[in-house]
Each structure stands twice: as structure tokens, then as C-alpha cells.
């Protein structure tokens, strides 16, 4: 948490800071297991398969497919503590 930004909520930012070009990386295609970290090399290979890559100023959306584990019962901690991510 950045203390200096605690009073910043979405409506305080200019629209050009929260809207823009975006690219979706379908990270689930890498078959990451709980707790795995995706490497730079894996992302570069995925970009090659996509035929596209993020450009300067693009918003990057990474879909790990992890929503299948979303729970609101006592098992929520599994979702919150075992998600895959990126290594760098």
C-alpha cells in the first residue's frame, strides 16, 4: 500500500489514465498450477503464438483462468494464497 495514494480512488484520475488500448494474455494456455510463476520466456512464446504483444501505454490483462477457484465460503483462502503469477 502506498500511503500517499490512500485518498486516490478511481474517480480522482483523468479518464486517459484508466482507459486505453489493451491486450489480453490468455495465461491459462500455459497450464499454470497453483502457486506457479510464469517466466519471461513463457510470455514471449505466448506472444509469438498470439501474433501480438503489448505496446507502450497498453493496458495488459492477464487471464490465468483462476476464477474457477473463486469461493465466498471458508475455502476463499485457497484462491487468495495459491494463485499463479509472473516471476519477474
Image: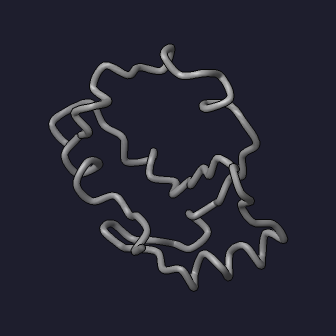
Residue 16 falls in image quadrant: top right
* 27 over 67 or under it: above or below: below
* 22 over 53 or under it: above or below: above
- What residue is at 27 percent from the left and 59 percent from the top? 82
- What residue is at 69 percent from the left and 50 percent from the top? 57
Q: Quadrant of the C terminus?
A: bottom left
Q: Nearer the viewer, residue 26 or 33?
A: 26
Is 25 placed left or right of 39 in the picture?
right
* 73 over 75 or under it: above or below: above
Q: Position of residue 29 (x, y in %)?
A: 61, 69
Is 16 placed left or right of 6 in the picture?
right
- What residue is at 37 percent from the left and 48 percent from the top? 69
Q: Position of residue 78 (x, y in %)?
A: 23, 51
Q: Quadrant of the N terminus?
A: top left
- What residue is at 72 percent from the left and 36 percent from the top? 20
Q: Nearer the viewer, residue 33 or 48?
A: 48
Q: Nearer the viewer, residue 88 or 56?
A: 56
Number of marks drawn? 0
Residue farthest along the top direction in this orientation? 11
* 34 over 87 or under it: above or below: above
Q: Position of residue 84 (x, y in %)?
A: 38, 64
Q: Position of residue 45 (x, y in %)?
A: 68, 82
Residue farthest along the left direction in this orientation? 74
Is 14 placed left or right of 74 in the picture?
right
Residue farthest along the right direction in this orientation? 51
Q: Nearer the viewer, residue 54 or 49?
A: 54
Amino acid at each position: 500500500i502506498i500511503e500517499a495514494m490512500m485518498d486516490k480512488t478511481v474517480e480522482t484520475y483523468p479518464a486517459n489514465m484508466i482507459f486505453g488500448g489493451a491486450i489480453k494474455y490468455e495465461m491459462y494456455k500455459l497450464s499454470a498450477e497453483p502457486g506457479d510463476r510464469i517466466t519471461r520466456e513463457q510470455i514471449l512464446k505466448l506472444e509469438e503464438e498470439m501474433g501480438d504483444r503489448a505496446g507502450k501505454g497498453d493496458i495488459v490483462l492477464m487471464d490465468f483462468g483462476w476464477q474457477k477457484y473463486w469461493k465466498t465460503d471458508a475455502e476463499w483462502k485457497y484462491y487468495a494464497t495459491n494463485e499463479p503469477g509472473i516471476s519477474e
